[in-house]
Structures are given as C-alpha cells and as structure tokens.
Image (spheres, rainbow, N blue to C red):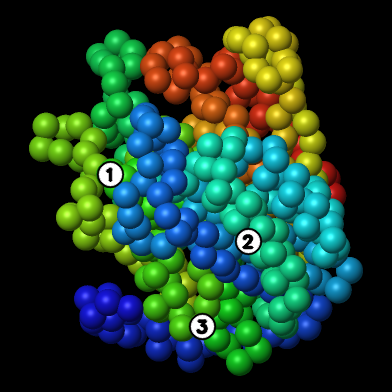
Amino acid sequence: MSRILTATLTTGFLICLTVSICHGQAADEPGMKVGVATVDITPEGPVYMMGFSGRDKDPSTGVYKPIEASCIVFDNGTTRVGIMALDVCKTGVEQLEQVRAAAQAVGIPPQQMMLNCSHSHCGPRVLGRQNAEYMPIFEERIRGLLQAAAADLQPVTLDYTVGSSTMAVNRRQLDAEGKYVGMRPEPRKGTDPDVPVLRAVRPDGTVRAVLFGYACHPTTMGGHEIGPDFPGFARDWIEAAYPGAEAIFLQGCGGDIKPRYSLPNGTFGYVLIDAKQTVAEIGHELGRAVVTATCLPPPKLGTYLGGLSDTAGLPTTKKVEDTPEGGLFPTEVQVLRIGDVYIVGMNGEILVEYGLRIKRELPDMKMWVNGYSNRDLSYVANAAAFAEGGYEVTTGWTTAEAEDILVSKAIELTRRLAGE
C-alpha cells in the first residue's frame, strides 16, 4: 500500500473504521457461507487491447497496474449462487460457456452464475483469438477461480446498503433542440449515483468480502499500458479499510457514462501514464463512497438464494451473427436473488436509463442493475437516445423497442424470484 493511501485512510476513516469494528456483526445465520477467490490475469508480455479505437493495431507496451479476476460463491446449504468479475472490456459466448460449465461442476446451475466485465479500456482483448498465446492462460485461470472459491466456503452474515457517488457524468452532449452533439460532459442528462454494497462478515466481525458496483465507463486512462482503471484503485481503498477482505467490482449500466475528468475546453481527456495519480484519485473517491456507506453496519440479509434467466428477442437493424436484419436476436436477461437483494445482469453496453427505470418501477425492492454481463452485445440504447441520435445509437444494432423489452423481462424475472 502506498504511503499516501495509508496516511489518507488513517486520517479519513479512523472514526468510521472504529465504529465498524465495534459494531461487527456475528454470523448468526449459520446456513450462509461464502467462498472468495481472486487471480492475477495480467498478461506477461505484449497483447492486443480492447476499448478505444485502434486497439487491435498496436500491442500493449507495459503494465501500469495488475488486472485481476475475482469470484464469489454464496452457499446456504441447499443452493449456490456465483458471480465472477473480470478486469476486461468484454467477453463472448465462449468464455461464458466455459465459466458456466465450471460453475455446474461445483453445483451452480447456469441461471445462478453471472459473469460481469468491468469494461476497462486498458485490458487485454479476450473476444476472438487475436491474443493466441494469452487466451489459454486467461481461460484456465478463470475456470480455476470457481473451484477455488467453492473450496473455501466459510460462515458469514451478509449485509447490504447503497452509498452514493458523483464521480461520473453523462457523456451524451445535446444541443438546444435536444439532439446529440458529441461525446462531451452533459450535466443536463442523468447518471446513476447509487453505489450498491454487499458485504460478507465473518463471525468475529471482520469483513471477508465486499461486492460493490457503479455505473461508469472505466475510461480515465489512455495509452497502451495494461491496467484496471478506476475500479482497481477503488478496490485498493476498500481492502485497505477492511484488512483481509476481497473487494469485487460490478459494472452497472454505464454505457453512456464516463468519469467526470475533462479538459479545460470541455472535452473528455485521458490520463497519460505519467499522470496516473488522477485515475487513482477517481478510484479512491469511489472506494470512499463504499466505506462511508458501511461506517455503521448495514441491515442484514437473509439466507435465501436463487436465480432466473430467460431470453428476450431484440429487433435488429442489421444482420447479427445468425440473426438476419429485422429479425429478433436472442439476448439473455438474468436476475440473481441474494437475501432480498435482486442483482440484474444484461448483455452488452446498457445505457444508464435502463437501470434507473428498473429501480423506478420497483421502488420497494432492492434492485442492483448491471450491464456488461455474461456476453458482449454492442451498445443497447434506450428509447430517448434514439430520438436524440448519436454514437451509442449508430454503433449499436438494436431499435428503440429494446428498452421496453429488456426492462419488462428484468421486472418479470424479479417478481418471479420474489414469489409474486
């Protein structure tokens, strides 16, 4: 840990950490166990990256911070649920099938295993086989994660709360007529400030794992060095606040959201390698939001575990894989239930309004909504974005109907899991 981070934590969180330790929760629901595993997936040499344009032309030149994959397995004695998080931009069907096969081998059915990408634009390309030497190593490591997590189940109590952060800004700038101008900060359009936090607390009151999320593109860093962008630095902050804990980040509906870091002329900038303190500061800001939200012990969760998954057909504007133009492309919508928290996972780069709308329509339920889950699907714009036009609309292949289709499916699955 850096001296700067140590000093800041000492001065910034001494009271908060003292309160948390003094009010540690005993694991009084012995039926709940959690297993956690993390593995380094940093390439050992140059690889092709993914995210910004041109990433497939020049390989990486180094590493500014190691990247990782993490897995958490929940077990209540009769049911298991798993979540895997990766510091990569996107994954495809091949990786999803491998992960779910490994999950089934440890007693987790496919509908109860979720894969989520941070969407770091400084990660290796794992779609396709362009990185032929790296891919077998990457895939072997993520398969082994499930076995490691399932083999290390320990009794815990789960708790849950929602913090808040304003570190992000909408990137779809509009003109006076409400039409898309370009990818620039647009404070008139919404973000999702929610920072959901689910903790696994040991019987002695110490924290074993912190699952947290936020909706924002990890695009603070430019250059050609491998790294996790702000989620990695947020994890550092949380793990420093809770020694012995594993922090795991889930990417929300951040398709049109970026870190608020911008240049004096009002355009987005990217931090260069010699100025990477900025990305650390942004990550630490998110980490502070997590720790602040848990200064006082959050409400406990019960031991219910479950998951549902279904296919929704999205109308296409062009041929996509085996689906012809105008056909219905099958996309997965998944909902996991942990206690009374419902974690939604949707394919692709989901715009922020999806998550906001699902939470508006289910105001009495604890909803945690994520894009970038299970497999890549390009951009999935909401209906209002189609009226505005612009990048996320023209680079995607869905239609304005996608919003109603996906939101309705997520709500349907949530209500079924709730027993309604």
Q: Secondary structure at mark 3?
A: loop
Q: Which quarter of the picture shows residue 280?
A: bottom left
Q: Amino acid at mark 3?
A: Gly
Inter-mark Cα distance, 1 to 3: 32 Å
Which residue shows up at 61% across the image and 10% down it? Answer: 318
Which one is in front in this view, the residue at disc 2 or the one at disc 3?
A: 2
Q: Which residue is mark 2?
A: 141
Q: Which quarter of the picture shows residue 191?
A: top left
Q: Amino acid at mark 1?
A: Gly
Inter-mark Cα distance, 1 to 2: 26 Å
* Residue 53, placed above or below residue 276: above
* Residue 19, placed above or below residue 371: below
Q: Residues within 10 Å of mark 2 (few under 14, many from 20)?
A: some
Q: Which circle's residue, 1 or 3, is located before the other in the chain?
A: 1
Q: Which residue is mark 3?
A: 244
Percent across and percent down for residue 388 are: 40, 14
Q: Which residue is mark 1?
A: 223
* Residue 388, placed above or below residue 153: above
Question: Is residue 199 visible in the rendered structure shown here?
Answer: no
Q: Residues within 10 Å of mark 3 (few under 14, many from 20)?
A: few
Q: Amino acid at mark 2?
A: Arg
Q: Secondary structure at mark 2?
A: helix
Which residue shows up at 81% across the image and 78% down it? Answer: 31
Percent across and percent down for residue 44 are: 45, 59
